[in-house]
Amino acid sequence: MRDRVLPASRLVMAGVLAMLALGACHDSGPDTRSTASGRPATAPPADPVSTTQAGTEPCTFSGATTAAEGGANSPTRLLTDVRVGVHDCYERVTFEFKPMPGDTAGPVSWKVAYETGPITEDGSGRPVTVKGPAHLVVHLSAQSADLTKADAPPTYTGPTSLQPAGATRIQQVRKTGDFEGYITWVIGLDTSRPFKVTTQDNPARVVVDVGD
């Protein structure tokens, strides 16, 4: 019996079917081709990363040279801190307070005004030297010691004269009085400049900004 020879067309068809079966077994993953073009699909572009940094807003200041006051009829508070800050277009003096024992937290009475010399100490009238040709005087309804206690412990233990490093407008901040429930500090300036007073809570603060 002679071997049966398959026609050439059937051999070609068998080869094609074998190749299709092999491809189906091998490619079991998801289709990653673009249905529109038949080319491999490209990943979506990543969101662009911004290299632009937020610009710093220019320093601005607005004030006046006329006297200012606030916190009328506020009770006497206890001074706890005095500090000076230096900024681009202004310099700042902050007075911080706490309530007297038994009182609730709240504002302090204040008055800020330019005064001509000589500068004197409250109560004694003794002359006090404060640097600078212009003097901004700050009156506060506060004291720096707790007089409700027998030993009258101080609540403010910082310096009574501050000369801030790097300041060009403020020459000196000096305490000139602590008498009968009122404290006086004098801000010595290089010249008469506009100022602005604001108050803050928790803790109570009186902030004096002096600018250009």
Image: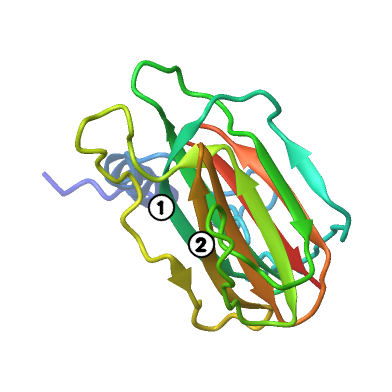
Identify the image's colour scheme: rainbow, by chain, secondary structure or one colour.
rainbow
Which quadrant holds the N terminus? top left
Q: 56 or 40: which is nearer to us?
A: 56
* Residue 117 visible in this rendered orientation of the protein: yes
Q: In the image, 159: left or right of 201? A: left
Residue 65 in picture, x, y percent from top left: 87, 61
Q: In the image, 14: left or right of 75? A: left
Residue at (61% x, 25% y) in the render: 74
Q: Which mark is residue 12?
A: 1
The mark that comes first in sequence, 1 or 2, is: 1
Q: 146 or 18: which is nearer to us?
A: 146
Q: Which residue is mark 2?
A: 175
Q: Amino acid at mark 2?
A: Lys
Q: 195 or 45: which is nearer to us?
A: 195
Residue at (76% x, 68% y) in the render: 211
Q: In the image, 126: left or right of 101? A: right
Residue 22 in picture, x, y percent from top left: 29, 46
Q: In the image, 26: left or right of 2? A: right
